[in-house]
Image (cartoon, helix red, strand yellow):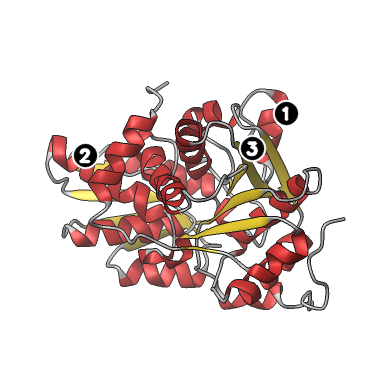
Amino acid sequence: MATLPEFTDVQAAYERIKAHVTQTPVVTSSLLNAWLGHTVLFKAECLQRTGSFKLRGATNFLHHYCQTHGLPEKIVANSSGNHAQAVAYAGSMLNIPVDIYSTESISPIKAAATQDYGAKLHLFPTRLEADAAVAAAAETEGVLWIPPFNHADIIAGQGTAVLEAITQTSEHTINAVFTPCGGGGLTSGALLTTRALIPEAQIIGVEPQNANDASISLQQGSIYTLPAPAQTLADGAATPAVGDITFEFLQQLDGFYEVNETQIAYWTQWLQHLLKLHIEPTCCMTMAGAVAWLTDQPKGQTVLVMLSGGNIATSTMQQIYAVDYLTQPPYLD
């Protein structure tokens, strides 16, 4: 297995990419805080360029590579959408052609944005087929493969979102950090950064019950691969398996929650309403994990929730709002 990244890699990544990414705000809702009896701080990476935190990892990977190897002739990547957009954008900034390999179920809005950034899109019936195709393409000389999560430079880049958030909230005592977990890149970077800057805080991952490969992996102590494509509103967390590097970090977490589809729709509606932001269900589900944790804590906790993206297809929005959950305000049991 490759060498695991360290916090110094996150710090180096931040210096490397800060001129190329947006410093996104940390927001809160006084009404939600009053309802819950706790303070919830949200890092709004939905306002990042390309609409997600993925730009951080892709930019760090590409610029670190170019510093040591020069510009590649072509870039390839495999992604369900947000990583695809990030790689397409990062490549376009350096005028490098980009080919993206994804599934036919990719969100139409993410597919369109990827192509608008100039990338060529190759679609396959399943994620495993797309992964195999990108691996084959990466064998060509001069082609650089930017993986979606299982690489030290990707993890370090994603960790800069948490580094930035902790710096922005230094007046608060943060008791726990919550991240959505797909392949585990953001969660791994969050663990590295949280352990270094606020070691007394817990770091907790959240994933869809319908795509619970990470949860099963943690329970059985080895990486589990979903037998079929996951059907979940949280499409950004529908990866079939975590990586060998990210799994090493996931095993160090203080907690991990699975969230059902009703909870995902519920929190997407409420966070969009309360924060007035266009937020993906993939990260809105993280709030369900935070509430489950807060239910067992004394009043007055402060938690940081990573809002990882804001790219949502119209069809997904229709599913989310098929039932009106805004008549049921969020209170702790």
| Location of residue 288 by image quarter | bottom right
Looking at the rendered structure, the kind of residue marked 3 is Ala
Does the CB distance between marks 2 and 1 fall below 8 Å? no
Residue identified by numbered label 1: 219
Which residue type carries mark 1? Gln
Task: Report the residue marked by disc 2.
Answer: 65
Q: Is residue 312 above or below residue 19?
A: below
Q: Which residue is mark 3?
A: 214
| Residue at position x 30%, y 45% in the image | 14
Compared across the picture, whether 105 is left or right of 146 comes to: right
Identity, as a three-letter code, of the amino acid under mark 2: Tyr
Secondary structure state at the residue bearing disc 2: helix
Q: Residues within 10 Å of mark 2 (few under 14, many from 20)?
A: some
Q: Residue sitting at 45 percent across and 59 percent down?
A: 82
The quarter of the displayed image where residue 327 is located: bottom right
Q: Is residue 332 left or right of residue 44?
A: right
Q: Mark 1: which secondary structure?
A: helix
Considering every residue shown, the one lying at the far right of the view is 333
Question: Of 124 and 158, which appears nearest the observer?
Answer: 158
Q: Is residue 210 visible?
A: no
Question: Could you tell me which residue is drawn at 27 percent across and 37 percent down?
Answer: 12
- Label 2 to label 1: alpha-carbon separation: 36 Å
**Relative image position of residue 258 (x, y in whole percent):** 73, 46
Query: Which residue lies at the image location 19% right of the left edge and 38% below the top edge?
Result: 141
Q: Which quarter of the rendered picture does the N terminus lie within? A: top left
- Nearer to me, 185 or 126: 185
